[in-house]
Amino acid sequence: MNSGMWNPWHGCHKYSEGCLNCYMFSFDKQRDVDSNFVHKTSDFDLPIKKDRYHNFKVKDESHLSVCLTSDFFIEEADVWRSDVWDFIKARGNVKFSLFTKRVYRIVQCLPSDWGDSYENVEIVLTVENQKRADERLPIFLALPLKHRVLTVSPMLEKIDLSKYLKTGLIEEVYCSGENYKNSRVCDYDWVKNLSEQCKSANVKFIFFAIGSKFRKDGKIYYIPYKKGKDQATKANLNFIPKEKV
């Protein structure tokens, strides 16, 4: 399956503790761009764009991660979202992962024909600490969704998700430390504990980036971003249930 990104709009507003050192704000600042200005991008209709041979540029069976430089359910995008739902529905053979922290807005932003969800859509909820997990997950688990994914990124403290994982409603959990300037520490024991929670609940767990400031056995390591993914893999904390291999 081909993987890619789709940012139909760009810009966001810092929303909770995990947003403090947001990479998007950092990159925009370097380009003298106002990150708080939410606007449509030139890729707004990417899923239905065609090449000169009238073939879709996004191939069948692709997987698109949506709104990595914004939030899919941000308020400013309400006027554009119905078109995006149409694009998603039109490409039923493409998988869409919709990223958000704004879980309380999801139900009011779903399309009228949503039912119990579009089969090709997964909602990816971000949490960063216990407070936000306990605030967002009860709402998340009560929504009419077929596919729920959780990303703990950046992981800012030890988090207990066991009671949520045991519901069987969360299909996958992803985790990472914080990257780039002013990164806060991520601790190996926090990640290991979360991995064990997922293993106990038979939920897929992927530690995808170690973060720029990583602590293990009381010692702090400063990791260049380009090595973060490799180091996360070497930590050997990933878990994939046998039936999902």
Image (cartoon, rainbow, N blue to C red):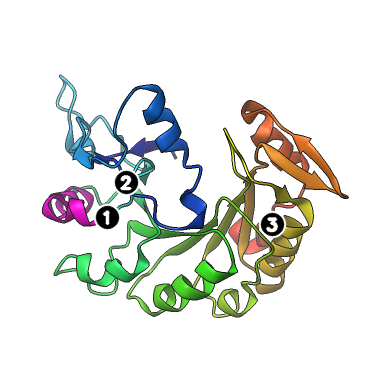
Marks counted in the figure total 3
Q: Secondary structure at mark 1?
A: loop
Q: Quadrant of residue 192?
A: bottom right
Q: Nearer the viewer, residue 123 or 95?
A: 123
Mark 3: which secondary structure? loop
Query: What main secondary structure does the magenta stretch of the protein show?
Result: helix
The answer, for residue 144, to whether it is visible in the render is yes
Q: Earlier in the sequence, mark 1 or mark 3?
A: 1
Please name the residue that numbered disc 2 is placed on.
12
Of marks 2 and 3, the one in the foreground: 2
Q: Is residue 78 magenta?
A: yes
**Residue 125 location, x and y as percent?**
44, 60
Asked whether the beta carbons under mark 1 and mark 2 sit within 8 Å of each other, the answer is yes
Q: Name the residue at 68% across, 29% down.
A: 227
User: The magenta stretch spans which residues?
Assistant: 75-89
Quick check: 173 left or right of 224? Answer: left
For marks 1 and 3, give the CA distance: 32 Å
Local packing at callout 3 (Cα closer than 10 Å; few below 14, some 14-19, many 20+) is: some
Say if 51 sits above or below 190 in the image. above
**Residue 54 left/right relative to 172:** left
**Identity of the amino acid at label 1?**
Ile
